[in-house]
Image (tube, helix red, strand yellow):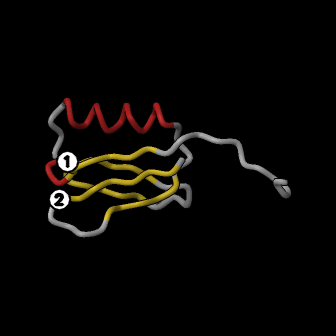
């Protein structure tokens, strides 16, 4: 799952690939924002952790789940 997070006062976004489903990511982020948590922690498919202050999040983009294609497309 491709995840992109916009960070306040930063010209670049945080982008990474996650093994979690779109619903799981949405639930984690919504839970942190609704609980007014100070930090949001997400991990990528390589095991790296990202700790983001919730006050700095401007947007969250979650990619579409697709099966990987193998071979050539005519």
Taking depth in this image into account, of 12 and 29 the one nearest to the observer is 12
43 relative to 50 in the view: left or right: right
- In the image, is residue 42 above or below residue 25? below
Q: Which mark is residue 31?
A: none
- In the image, is residue 19 above or below residue 33? below
Q: Residue 26's x, y, as percent? A: 38, 35
Identify the residue at horizontal 44%, vertical 44% (top origin).
Answer: 62
Q: Residue 54's x, y, as percent? A: 19, 47
Name the residue beneath numbered marker 2: 8
Identify the residue at horizontal 84%, vertical 58% (top origin).
Answer: 72
Which circle, 2 or 1, is nearer the viewer? Answer: 2
27 relative to 74 in the view: left or right: left
Q: Using a 10 Å C-alpha cutoff, classify the residue at mark 2 as few (fewer than 14 neighbours), some (14 to 19) or many (20 or more).
A: few
Identify the residue at horizontal 72%, vertical 48% (top origin).
Answer: 68
Q: Which mark is residue 54?
A: 1
Q: Using a 10 Å C-alpha cutoff, classify the residue at mark 1 as few (fewer than 14 neighbours), some (14 to 19) or many (20 or more).
A: some
18 relative to 52 in the view: left or right: right
Question: Gap in Å between the C-alphas at discs 2 and 1?
Answer: 10 Å
Q: Residue 1's x, y, as percent? A: 54, 47
The first of marks 2 and 1 along the sequence is 2
Name the quadrant of the C terminus: bottom right
Identify the residue at horizontal 32%, vertical 62% (top origin).
Answer: 13
- In the image, is residue 26 above or below residue 74? above
Q: Secondary structure at mark 1?
A: helix
Q: Secondary structure at mark 2?
A: loop
């Amino acid at each position: 799952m491709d995840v992109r997070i916009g960070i306040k006062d930063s010209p670049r976004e945080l982008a990474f690939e996650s093994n979690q489903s779109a619903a799981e990511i949405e639930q984690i982020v919504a839970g942190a924002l609704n609980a007014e948590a100070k930090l949001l922690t997400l991990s990528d498919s390589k095991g790296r952790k990202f700790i983001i202050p919730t006050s700095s999040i401007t947007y969250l983009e979650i990619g579409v789940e697709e099966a990987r294609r193998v071979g050539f497309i005519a």
